[in-house]
Image: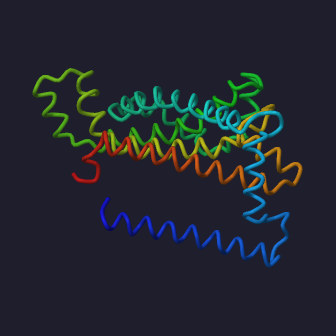
C-alpha cells in the first residue's frame, strides 16, 4: 500500500471518528429526541442484544443469510442474463432496438409500482422478492455491458475478423475482455440498486431478513434497532463492494491504463 493510500485511509478513519464523536455529543447533550436519534451506546446495546438473542425468533445470522440469499440469487440471475444480452445488443443494433423499449420502460419505475404484480404472479414467498431484486439489477448491468461493447474500437474487431475469429470467438476473446471495465462498473451499480431495493422486497410477507428487521422495528419505534440494522446493512454493502473491486483489480489490471 502506497503512502497516498495510507493517507486516504487515515482521512476516512478520521471522518468516521468525527461523525461518531459528534453523534455522541449531540445525544449526550439531549439536543435531539432519543426517539429520533438514539445514542451510539443504545445502538450498540441493541446490536449486542440482537447478536445474542436474535430478533423475533430468528438469529441475526439467519436474518443476514436470508437477505444475502435473496440478493445473491437475484444477482446471479442478472449476471447470467444481462451480460450475454448486453454483449449481443451492443454488437447488434437490431437486437438493441428490439430490447431497449422494454428496458427503458421499466427501468425508471419505482420497485413498489410493480412489486404487487410480482406478488400476484409469483406468490408471497422468496420467488417474488428475488424477481424484484433481479429486475432492479438487470437494467443497469445490461446498459453498462451495451455501453462497454459499443466503446470497443472497430479496428480491434476488424483485426480479429482478419485473423479468422469466428462470431463466438469474437464475443469471447474480443468484446467480453474489452468490455470488462464497464461490466464491473455495471456490476457495482447493479448490486447497489438491488441492495437498496432489499427493504421493499422484504416488505410483503417476510418474517426474516435485515430489511424486514428494520421495517418491523420501525412499527414499534425502536430507533436503536433501526440504526443498528442500517449500520449493519451499510457495513455488508461495503464488504460486498470491496470484494467486487478486488476482483476487478485481479481480472482487469489494465482498467484505466489504456
Q: Quadrant of residue 73?
A: top right
Q: Position of residue 48 (x, y in %)?
A: 74, 49
Q: Is residue 102 above or below residue 153?
A: above
Residue that protrudes farthest toward the left in the picture: 163
Q: Is residue 170 above or below residue 209?
A: above
How far across and down, in percent of the image, does residue 77 sit? 52, 27
Residue depicted at 81% across the width and 73% down the height: 32
243 vs 72, left or right, is left
Q: Nearer the viewer, residue 179 or 205?
A: 205
x and y, in percent, of residue 81 in the image: 47, 27
In depth, the one of 158 and 250 nearer the eye is 250
Q: Quadrant of residue 169?
A: top left
Q: Residue furthest right?
A: 220
Name the residue rendered at 11%, 28% in the picture: 162
Residue in view at x 64 percent, y 29 percent: 130
**Count of number-bearing discs:** 0
Name the residue rendered at 78%, 32% in the picture: 206
Q: Which of 3/68 is in front?
A: 3
- For the N terminus, the image quarter is bottom left
Residue lying at the far front in this picture: please name it.
Answer: 52
| Protein image colouring | rainbow
Amino acid at each position: 500500500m502506497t503512502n497516498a493510500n495510507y493517507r486516504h485511509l487515515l482521512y476516512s478513519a478520521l471522518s468516521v471518528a468525527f461523525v461518531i464523536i459528534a453523534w455522541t455529543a449531540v445525544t449526550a447533550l439531549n439536543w435531539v429526541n432519543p426517539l429520533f436519534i438514539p445514542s451510539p451506546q443504545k445502538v450498540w446495546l441493541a446490536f449486542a442484544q440482537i447478536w445474542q438473542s436474535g430478533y423475533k425468533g430468528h438469529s441475526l445470522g439467519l436474518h443476514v443469510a436470508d437477505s444475502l440469499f435473496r440478493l445473491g440469487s437475484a444477482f446471479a440471475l442478472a449476471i447470467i442474463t444481462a451480460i450475454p444480452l448486453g454483449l449481443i445488443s451492443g454488437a447488434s443494433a437490431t437486437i438493441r432496438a428490439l430490447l431497449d423499449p422494454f428496458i427503458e420502460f421499466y427501468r425508471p419505475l419505482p420497485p413498489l409500482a410493480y412489486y404487487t404484480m410480482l406478488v400476484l404472479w409469483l406468490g408471497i414467498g422468496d420467488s417474488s422478492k428475488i424477481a424484484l431484486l433481479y429486475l432492479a439489477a438487470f437494467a443497469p448491468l445490461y446498459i453498462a455491458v451495451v455501453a462497454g461493447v459499443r466503446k470497443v474500437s472497430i479496428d480491434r474487431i476488424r483485426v480479429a475478423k482478419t485473423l479468422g475469429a469466428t462470431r463466438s470467438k469474437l464475443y469471447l476473446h474480443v468484446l467480453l475482455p474489452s468490455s470488462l471495465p464497464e461490466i464491473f462498473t455495471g456490476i457495482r451499480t447493479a448490486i447497489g440498486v438491488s441492495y437498496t431495493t432489499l427493504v421493499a422486497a422484504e416488505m410483503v410477507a417476510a418474517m426474516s431478513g435485515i430489511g424486514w428487521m428494520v421495517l418491523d422495528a420501525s412499527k414499534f419505534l425502536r430507533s436503536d434497532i433501526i440504526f443498528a440494522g442500517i449500520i449493519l446493512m451499510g457495513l455488508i454493502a461495503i464488504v460486498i463492494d470491496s470484494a467486487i473491486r478486488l476482483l476487478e483489480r485481479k481480472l482487469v489490471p489494465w482498467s484505466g491504463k489504456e
